[in-house]
Image (cartoon, coloured by chain):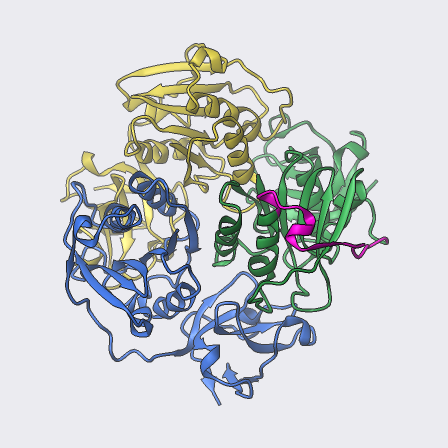
Chain colours: A blue, B green, C yellow
Amino acid sequence: MIFLFTDFGVEGPYVGQVKAALWQTAPQSPVFDLFADAPDRRPREAAYLLAAYAESLPPDSHILGVVDPGVGGERPPVALRLDGRWYVGPGNGLFEIALRRARHIEAYVIDWRPARLSSSFHGRDLFAPILGRLASGQTAEQAGLRDAPVPRFADWPDDLPAVIYLDRYGNLMTGLRDATINRNTILRLAGRKIVWARTFSEVPAGEAFWYGNANGLVEIAVNGGSAAQIFAAELGVIVEII
Amino acid sequence: MIFLFTDFGVEGPYVGQVKAALWQTAPQSPVFDLFADAPDRRPREAAYLLAAYAESLPPDSHILGVVDPGVGGERPPVALRLDGRWYVGPGNGLFEIALRRARHIEAYVIDWRPARLSSSFHGRDLFAPILGRLASGQTAEQAGLRDAPVPRFADWPDDLPAVIYLDRYGNLMTGLRDATINRNTILRLAGRKIVWARTFSEVPAGEAFWYGNANGLVEIAVNGGSAAQIFAAELGVIVEII
Amino acid sequence: MIFLFTDFGVEGPYVGQVKAALWQTAPQSPVFDLFADAPDRRPREAAYLLAAYAESLPPDSHILGVVDPGVGGERPPVALRLDGRWYVGPGNGLFEIALRRARHIEAYVIDWRPARLSSSFHGRDLFAPILGRLASGQTAEQAGLRDAPVPRFADWPDDLPAVIYLDRYGNLMTGLRDATINRNTILRLAGRKIVWARTFSEVPAGEAFWYGNANGLVEIAVNGGSAAQIFAAELGVIVEII
């Protein structure tokens, strides 16, 4: 199973072209959209989102991760095998948090280059063919990977007390893991205190609360309303733990 | 064939995770997006939209319907077989209109629970596995369904004279069926009268009209313009029949 | 491989219904989204976008192209085979630029009509079944095509010096082909001059530049910012070549 985690957006020609490229190298592998609207050109916030969502994927999943503001520049293209799952994408920190939480790690730099490599769309031209080769059973060596360390981002925290995703309902996902804080914890956002509840139906309409979402992240929501609106929240805004 | 009818939004991780869960139980069944932007947390409006669109689906379709503001609360998870088509989702009225229009009805409550059931994402954890089992040939009993009545919403009208969906072009779908009103009918929205036309190309540019859309709903449109903009229309606004 | 190029939007029931219709006639053909948000009801701008993106598709691709403001009116439904690739959709100029650039051309008008043809959704009812038949190996004749000239739009330029697409990052695609202008060319948009750079990482943050995008179009971008915002650009705005 192949999963796509990108900031390409659901509109436009990007996701479709990547899927076509994957199909051309791995026609047997089903492809699923995990996120097409990961934090726009922000690999740091995206790293916490990806780590949380990848954790529940099947252990032999193949993940294409592309949040790549430095495309065409210095950052190396990388491939990682973390606890069985493959991650392919830019070596800009996007996989840092997943890497840090993994027990079994293989790290590679991608040496292979396609005949035609655009300067701005490595997702289609470089990462998709590599991931497709791995998904279709090629070894790291056959796929053109070289055993090598990847760039690390040691100063990033283990959990990020900030909004890392806003969904259609106006729910605010944070980079905090539910399992790391207890339910008596009070959060503060935009000067307001927020307490825990198990889920929407346990809170009066219009009231804000935090809960552990279905992928283990602390999420701030409003029953029947939009937390994004009520807190005028934006990507990256700090969430304080009191 | 599996069809998804949800208010999850096209963005975010929801639809993709549901598709992955379906594939894990029913890998042979193709999955299609019917609506990912059904009326946001409004099962009543969504019920009229779903009934209209499900009617033209193949008779052995499997439909995952999730518009579920009460997730984690009291509403039972249900499965219905209506004129051959399976519907799986929350028992909150989302299937009321399809149910009311069906000739052959089987109604079930879902007794099965997964090993790990999140409090907020039953679409992925509960409804998708059940629908997948049914799509892969399991009987109701094998899938963990119990023959039982589902909640009914008898006070809802048979047709809803209101805007139930706004599309990209600014067209306004109503909960009225084209077949139930005649073409001399005049509609009124935002104080303006609207007459029937067969289609866009029969109306001067910039003019509003109503017509029977490709799925049998009365739809208000503007040739070359946006009815949503011109009428400042929102989801749920009343459309009068004069 | 089937590719969809439409202005249906990623939301709503349109793309999903088209995919279901394709699957019913060509279940073996994988379907990919090229654009679901092509220029809204503007076949002229869309023609330049489609020509550029179709060029890199495999030579046996089947392309459903629907940007069709005149649906239900006079424009004929057409099918074209251009350098091996099939294009099916409205004869309103959407395929004009691809046609003009092709070496091997077969042109057809679609005579076949389905048992039930809606007045507003020919993408689902007419074009998808035809494309599906061709993709599943039927000949033009078997599919219900008649060898006939299609409407031409001789007064459209070969390249369009205008914004034809705005993407999620705020990048502005133009209807100019990178290969037709040299890198010393200066563009002017909203009174400001824009010079060439190879890619994002070669430009200071916040600075605008133009480059040849991954599909051969001249694209205006801002490193780490949004050209759409900075230039207050809209679909169709003229880009001057100085």
Residue B172 in the image: state x and y as whole percent. 65, 44
Of the pair B227 and A77, the residue shown nearer to us: A77
Residue shown at the point (15%, 39%) measured from the top left: C182
Q: Where does residue A49 sit, x and y in percent of width and height?
A: 40, 67
Magenta-drawn stretch contains B42? no
Q: Is residue C63 left or right of residue B1?
A: left
Residue found at the far front of this picture: B142
Q: Quadrant of the C terminus of chain C?
A: top left
* Relative vertical location of residue C92 with respect to residue A120 in this rendering, above or below: above
Q: Kindly tell me whether residue C30 is visible in this rendering.
A: yes
Give, as a single range, the part of the protein colored magenta: B134-154
Left or right of B148: which side holds A158? left
Q: Residue at x 33, y 69 (%)?
A: A98
Count every numbered label the image shows and give the total: 0
Q: Quadrant of the N terminus of chain C?
A: top left
In this rendering, is residue A26 above or below A58?
above
Is the residue B223 above or below the residue A113 in the image?
above
Query: Front-most of B189 and B77?
Result: B77
Residue B129 lies in quadrant: bottom right
In reply to whether residue B141 is colored magenta, the answer given is: yes
Q: Residue at x 79, y 36 (%)?
A: B186
Percent position (x, y) of residue C112? 54, 15
In the depicted structure, whether residue B131 falls above or below residue A176:
above
Q: Would you say C184 lies left or right of B159 here?
A: left
In the drawing, does residue C177 fall left or right of residue C81? left
